[in-house]
Each structure stands twice: as C-alpha cells, then as structure tokens.
Amino acid sequence: MRCGSCETDGSGGRNGSGTDQKVKKIKVALAGQPNVGKSSIINSMTGARLHVGNFSGVTVEKKEVFIERDGYEIEIVDLPGIYSLNAYTPEEQVAKKFLYNEDYDLIINVADANTLSRNLIFTFQLMDMQKKMILVVNMIDEVEKQGGTVDREKLEELLGIPVVLTSAKEHRGVDEIVDHIIEVYKSRKPKNKLFYDERIEEQIGKLVKVLHKSPHFKDPDEARFIAIRLLDRDEEIYKIIHDLPIFIELHEMLGQIYRELEMEFDEESTSDILSDERYAMAKALVLKALKKPPKKLTVTDRLDRLLIHPILGLPIFLFFMWLLFQVTFEVGSIPMDWIDAAFTEISNTVKAVLPDGPIQSVLADGIIPAVGSVIMFLPNILILFLGINLLEQTGYMARAAFLLDGFMKKFGLQGKAFIPLVSGFGCTVPAYMAARTLKNPKDRIITMLVLGFMSCSARLPVYVLLIGAFFPTSHAGNILFIIYISGAILGLIVAKVLRTVLFKGEPEPFVMEMPPYRFPSMKALSVELWIKAKLFLKKAGTFIAGASMIIWFLSSYPHDSRLAQSYETRIEAAVDEAKKMELQGELAAKELENSYLGTIGKTIEPIFEPLGFDWRVSVATIAGLAAKEVVVSTLATLYAVGDADEKSNTLIERLRENISFKAAVALIVIIMIYSPCIAAMSTFWAEVPQWAWRGFYLVYPNVLAWLAAFGVYTLLGALGY
Amino acid sequence: MKPLTECTIGCEGRIVKIKAKDPIKGRLFSLGLAKGSEIKILDHTLAKQTWEVESDGTKIALREEEAASVFMEPVGGCE
C-alpha cells in the first residue's frame, strides 16, 4: 500500500493539457455516490443555467448546468448517483457508461464528509481512470457541527488532486469549484499517485505490456486503467478487449493472474482483493485527514427510533400516506374549478370570435375542452409530486420501503414499489414516473404493469354516475370503497402472477442505504416542481391536443347536412325550451350515430355484446381510453341528454332504462381494470423502451378487464339479477 | 461469529465474513460493509424480514436473506 506515502510532486503529466484549444468550452462530469448532495451543489452555483433532459436512449433524467466565467463556457453534467464502478442498478449503468464513453474534460467527484471513507473507495476507482479530477467534500457543515474537521491540505497532498470543502446548504465553497475547474483544465494532468500492493502492481504491469501491443492502448495511462478494471472483473471492459486480436494472449494471461493473486491473497476474486486494498487505503487516509469526535446520538437516530419502530412504524407511515392524499385532493380541488372555468371561458370566446365551421368546432369543442380537462389535474399532480419529493428528499422514503418490504415481497414486489402504487390512486401519470425510483428493471415493469388497477381520480366521475344510477344511495360510499379496494387487491394478485409466470425467481435482493434525515432545500424543490409543471403543460399542449383532435374528428364526421336541416326546422318550430333542448340532444345523438365514431361503435358492438353493452356503452368505453371522464360525457351525449354532468337525473334515468344492472356492474369492472387514459399510456410508452412490454401493456389489461367483466356479468345473471 | 440475523437490536461488533456472492457482495462493500468493518444492529421489522444496520456512519437496510450472509463477531450490547 503506497498511496499516502508517495511523492508529493504533482507535475509532469504525460498528456498534453487543454490550454491551446481554440474553443474555450469545458465539459465536466459530476460523479458521486447517491445522497451526497450533487444536485444541491449545482443548484446552488451562482449564475448557473439549468437544463434538464434525458440521457440518450434512457429515461434517466439528465441535469446539466452551464456557467460562463473568465471567457470559458463550463458545462457540468450531473450523473446519476453511483456507488461504485462495479455498477449494479440501471441508473448506475448510465453514470458508468457516461464516464467510460463520453467525451469530457474533467471529473468532479462529490463525497459526503460524514461517510468519507466509504466515498473515497469510489474516488479511488475514479482516480484509476487517470483523468483530471477534483474532489469535492460536501456537507462539511454537518461534520463541523459535531465538532469534527477535515484537513483539506492533507487530503490534497495524499491524493494528489485538488480538494474543495463545501456545504451546499450554507453555500460555502460552491463557487470555488468553478475556479478550480478552470485551473485544473488549464494545468497539466497530475501524476498518478494511486498505487496498489506491489504484487498487484506487478500483475498490472504485465497486463499493460500486453495491452500495449494493441494500437488501441498505446497510452500508458489508459492501458493501466484497462488493466485495473480487468482485475476488478469489469464486464464492460472485458467486452471491449474481447474483440481485439490480443484477446487470446490476454485471456490466457488473465486467467493465470486471477489464480495467482487469489491464491496469494486467499480471496475468492481479484475484485475482492482490489476492494480490500481500496478499503484499507480509504481507512488510512481518513485516519490522517479527518478528525471526528466519538459519534453522538443524532437526530436521525432519534427519529428512526420512532419512525421505523417495529410496532409503531407502520401506523405512522399509513398516517403520512393518508395525509398526503387528503392534501392532494382537498387542496388540489380548489384551483380545479378555476381552471375549468377559465377553459370554458376560452372556449366560449373562441366560439364568439371565430365564424361557425369546422375550425371553430375543432378548437372550441375538440382541443380546448380536452386540454383543459387534462390541465385541470395539474394542481393534484404538482401537490402529489411535491409530497413524494419531500418523502424522497427528507429520507423518509427509504424508511417506508424498509417497513413495507416484507409485505410487498409476498406479492413479488419491492418495498419501494409501494410509493408509485399509492400515487396511482391520484393519477397514473406521475405514478409511472414515480416507478423510476425502482432500480431493478423487472420490479419496475411489474409495478408499472399493475399500476393501472389503482383507480385514478379521473375514474371517480364514472363510478359516481354508475353507483348513483344502479345502487341505493345509502350504500354508495361502501360500494365506492369496495371498488377501490378490489382494484388494489387485484393489482397485488396480478403482480404475484406476473412474478411467478413472466418474471421467474425472487425479486431482486433488497440492500439499500438509509440516508440521514435532511431538510430539503426549498430552491431545489421548487426547481423540481417547475420542471414537472413545464413538462406536463408541454405534453398537454402537444400530445393531448393532437389526440383530442382525432376524437373530435371521428365524432363530427361525416356530416349529414340533410339530417341537420330537418332537425333545425323542427327545433325552430318547437314551442317551449324543453322541447327545443330535447330535439337538439336528439340531433346530436343521431349525428354521432352516423359519425365515424358511431360506425366504429356499431362495429365493435359484438365484442361487448356478451357483457350486455349496446353500441353506445361500447363507444363510451372505447372513448374512455382517451380519458376516463370522457366516459361520462360520451354516455351523456349518446343518450341524448345534451350537456349532462354526472349528477343529471335524466341521464341516470336513461341509463336505468337502457342498461341492465348486471351490465352496469360489468361496466364498472371494465373501467376499473382496462387500459388507463392516453396520457398514462404514452407515459408508459416513454418510460418503457422494450416493444414486447409495450405490446403486452396494450393488450393484457383489456383482455383481463373483459374476462373479469364477463365473469361478473355471468355470475350476476346466474344469481337472478 | 454469527450471522446478523441471530443478533439482537443494539448488538455491536465487527464483520468477520461475508458469504454473499457478487453482485450483492460488491453492493454491500460499496455501502461500507466489508470484512473488518464495525457494525451495529439498529432495527428489524416485526417479522424480522428486513434489518437495519449501521457501519461507519452509514445506515443500511437489508433483507433477511442478505443479512444472514453477513457474519459478525459481537463485542457488546448483545443479549
């Protein structure tokens, strides 16, 4: 073990520096373990412009900041948290791929001062890459509060790279990072100061020699990195050398080196040997550079005693969940009416300003109300997201996962899956996005596939209407509760089935860091919310608007002018207002029946006939794929009551006349199970890149819904309803 | 030497062996659970299906199966 005692001369890098480049752009990769406060660092940098996108090909969020300073344009890419280059989760893979393959000028490695030695192990892996690098030791305030200190100079001396002590919370040292970036960028690469045990170094040397035979690895620094990664059993690197002509020689040599080292160190794998080395180095470094008084009982310890108490923990969690939903719906419903009113106003203005015709109609009847009905849910979504973000950033989410893991495991799910599932009762769209917190792709897919069974708030109007029409008022609340609960139970059962049939084996092992409780930064929270709002509004303005135009077109064309004329003369001839309204409603229904949508309805009627649906219910069911509220408005139009809402008695009466009780129950079952709205489906589409799952997702809920509805319909029939 | 799952809450000691296979072993390691690390049992759920331990200031949750693969030499605080 020689790092720490090695020479302090930091000059003499072998590669050319970047000083002569014409374009003064510096690209920086920000890497660090999870929960070290990387995002808070870039959020608190002065004069930084934030840009949010996705890493290419995956839905992992990519945050970048741009800073201009001293004639340089600095771009900092915030990589997903990564514990080690031996990446484990999909998000870590993204970070690793970026570090390996992308073109950047230097690495900023952020470490948490509280857990410095564990963080340094990753720092050593990064240093193996032989790139220009800065170590940022964050959360220094927390260490100081406990009476500890970090010796910055000592760390710099021992590691041979610049070290900055920061506290993003107190805005300490954050802007200094930028100075260091420019300085390091201009300076020559420091000489490598990280050496392993001589026996390991000897083998690295052998590997480097062979690697040099290939034109790809003429650079000694890169060859050394490849050699170390091969000893660390890095499969990515192995794949790279696999296709080279030197592979056979290298492969033979590697096998021998593995055996020799493993024998010598009495370890199962060379990867373990390197880990032990880094572990010992980190311990030695921390011993020299970090002064820490004996650990006192922290706030986190005290809170955890209560919050994850074996008996009290679960009830407390359930209370928090209940509170989250109360706030989401109670507070979220306040601006809903305003938004609704605003869009009605816009729609009316359009009707008044534009001349009658298809353009007016597509705007006022098609796009504006549809976009409005989606934007109406923005407050709910933002509140729910704020709540989930708070849970995540305070560190409570990890506790919830801890508490629920045992229960969720019974259904083949992970503890963390509870959060998206619960969010699903609010709105399926943010719930799909919340599923990102599940690292394991299988767990994530299963969770997303059953999420639709958690009845979202948009299905409520349909349930209210149907319960009102077909059940006694005294039982309405209970029936509603049964619907929601059966959805949740069905979700858990399907998850279990999917796990046993399609995703064989146990869920991924559950090993998770429980970060200390922290008060989240308000700035970071508001930035997150603003990003969410922007993305949501963008989608509403593009995708939803487009989809609603199609629905409008299908329900408005072909236009039968003779039919319209004959009704118009009758409407004009009608004496009282009620008669006029009725005729208008009838006209609307006739036109709809003759429209493309009506034709489609008649065509699909046979599919729904076994469930007792007529073509109107069939069309409403299909239209519900656009948005669940549309089921109500479509039923209203199709039963010719004009503009009825879900409390309309006439609609309820007509439903009673036209639909049997068992068909109504079948309809409730269908609504509960079948595909969620287009917005949710497109979110799933965006989150899941595999075509097989996309296809499965489009088919199976609908098949299941039909089968379940048919079962219920037949059963009720047998019972004499 | 005994697996974590046979220890009680409050038990402190040192890790002497990790039987888990990669990649779990690597994961445990990068969280700070390695041969030689100090470890303290903080909590487990009622049915002992999930455990919480602390090592060098990091708190880690792990399932029964993973906890059973980590062996410690208790020093104090154990019943």
Image: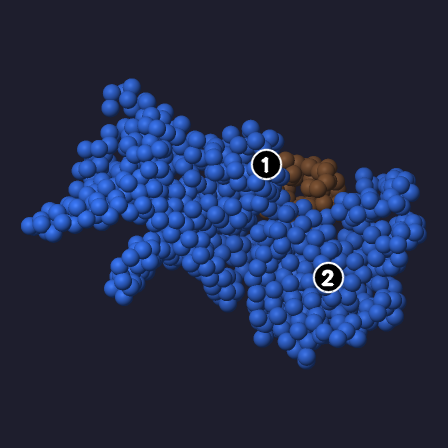
Crowd class of label 2 (few under 14; some 14 to 19; many from 20; radius 10 Å):
few
User: How many labels were placed on the picture?
Assistant: 2
Residue A46 in view (yes/no): yes
Q: Which of A280 and A55 is in front in this view?
A: A55
A182 vs A584, nearest the viewer = A584
Kindly indicate whether the residues beneath marks 1 and 2 are on one polypeptide chain: yes
Q: Which chain is blue?
A: A
> Who comes first in sequence, dot 1 or dot 2?
2
What residue does disc 2 label? Answer: A103
Q: Which chain is brown?
A: B
Amino acid carrying label 2: it is Asp
User: Disc 1 is attached to a residue of which chain?
Assistant: A
Q: Quadrant of residue A651?
A: top left
**Residue drawn 28% across and 32% down?**
A614
Residue A389 is tagged as none
What SS does tag 1 mark? Answer: loop
* Residue assigned mark 1: A507
